[in-house]
Amino acid sequence: MATEPSVAGPTTEEPTAEEPLVDGFGRVHRDLRISVTDRCDLRCDYCMPAEGLEWLDRSEILSFEEIERIATLCVRRLGVESIRLTGGEPTVRAGLVDLVARLAPLEVDLSLTTNGVRLRQLAAPLVSAGLRRINVSLDTLRRDRFERITRRDRLDDVLAGIEAAVESGLDPVKVNCVVVRGVNDDEVVDLARFGRDSGVTMRFIEYMPLDAQGRWDRPAVVGQDEIIAAISAVFPLEDEVRGRQPASRFRYLDGCGEVGVIPSVTEPFCGDCDRIRLTADGELRSCLFSTTGTDLRGVLRDPSADDDRLDALVRQVVAGKWAGHGISSVDFVRPRRSMSQIGG
């Protein structure tokens, strides 16, 4: 197996927390999303074309040492409290378990977003390495529909991966479904039932412009109110509970857990957003829908650059964060990179 290239450069010993990451709107940023690869073993039709995308060369992707350096700085000096590893599909990156073991000593809320295809084999090792919780993508329970959406016949693997995640002790296990009108909106109740029966938390995500090809259509969005009304008609729900997380949460009246909706289009949570995103090739972005990114890779690979320079760049990115993504605005401009290339 190939080893990770090490070009991390100098780091400050025992960094201590300084001023928190606050943008021009007073939002404090505590959540760092790190994409470890732009590659994926599925081809979801709302995310990328059937042939895939032009993948980054290995030399362009941040090494584990570089990721560890950025993560350590963000936690120790900038007040980050949670780290989520994303992709592409993070489990296709060789040595992912080792990366989790590197980040676990930071003692933050360490989680992973995955399509679940390889999770059956990886769940237990990831937990042993220090992973605390996980999000798994599942847009349908129907085999033919799964193959049509993802262009792969891997539904059994995903379901087995979700089961393995529960059995390994990951808590919570959240299962994310992107709801698209005319594609899978007729399965909302079935998926809610699956969550109740499987001991996982279903989270329904409003359809967003996730690719860079311009295929998103506003009428295809199924809003939070419609989703909750469909579920509550079968499994009555209590009033909404909303914390710092983007999901609106609803408890089942019979005590059988909860369900969440991420209403990014109909009820954007931009005013409470506390996330920054690091792409696999080292671009720092303040929003999933940012049209530009700030290069940290060049600084990481500059032997003369210390952590003060990285600190200043991260603060600069956060300070310039927009008020909101503006998806529903006529002035909305899509990023040139798809979500799989940015990190969900």
Image (spheres, rainbow, N blue to C red):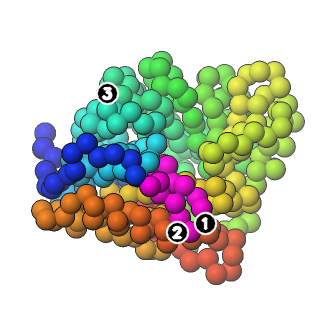
Tell me the number on the disc at residue 321.
2
Q: Nearer the viewer, residue 20 or 268?
A: 20
Please provide percent x and percent y for residue 263: 70, 53
Q: Residue at x 40, y 52 (%)?
A: 18
Q: Residue at x 34, y 33 (%)?
A: 104
Q: Which is more N-terminal, label 3 or label 1?
A: 1
Which mark is in front, 3 or 2? 2
Please provide percent x and percent y for residue 31: 48, 49
Quarter placement of the N terminus: top left
- Say if 328 sits above or below 99 in the image: below
Quickly name the residue at label 3.
Answer: 129
Q: Amino acid at mark 1?
A: Phe
The answer to whether mark 2 and mark 1 are in CB contact below 8 A is yes
Mark 1 surroundings within 10 Å by alpha-carbon count, few (fewer than 14), some (14 through 19), many (20 or more): few
Q: Which is more N-terminal, label 2 or label 3?
A: 3
Q: Residue at x 19, y 64 (%)?
A: 305
The answer to whether mark 3 and mark 2 are in CB contact below 8 A is no
- Say if 283 sits above or below 197 in the image: below
Q: Amino acid at mark 3?
A: Ala
Quick one: SS at disc 1?
loop
- Say if 26 sits above or below 190 in the image: below
Please provide percent x and percent y for residue 326: 64, 71
Q: Residue at x 83, y 33 (%)?
A: 238
- Using the numbered discs, state the Cα–Cα distance from disc 2 to disc 1 in whole angstroms: 8 Å
Q: Amino acid at mark 2?
A: Lys
Examine the structure image and report whether residue 23 is included in the region drawn in magenta.
Answer: yes
Tell me the number on the disc at residue 25.
1
> Which residues are the magenta region?
19-32
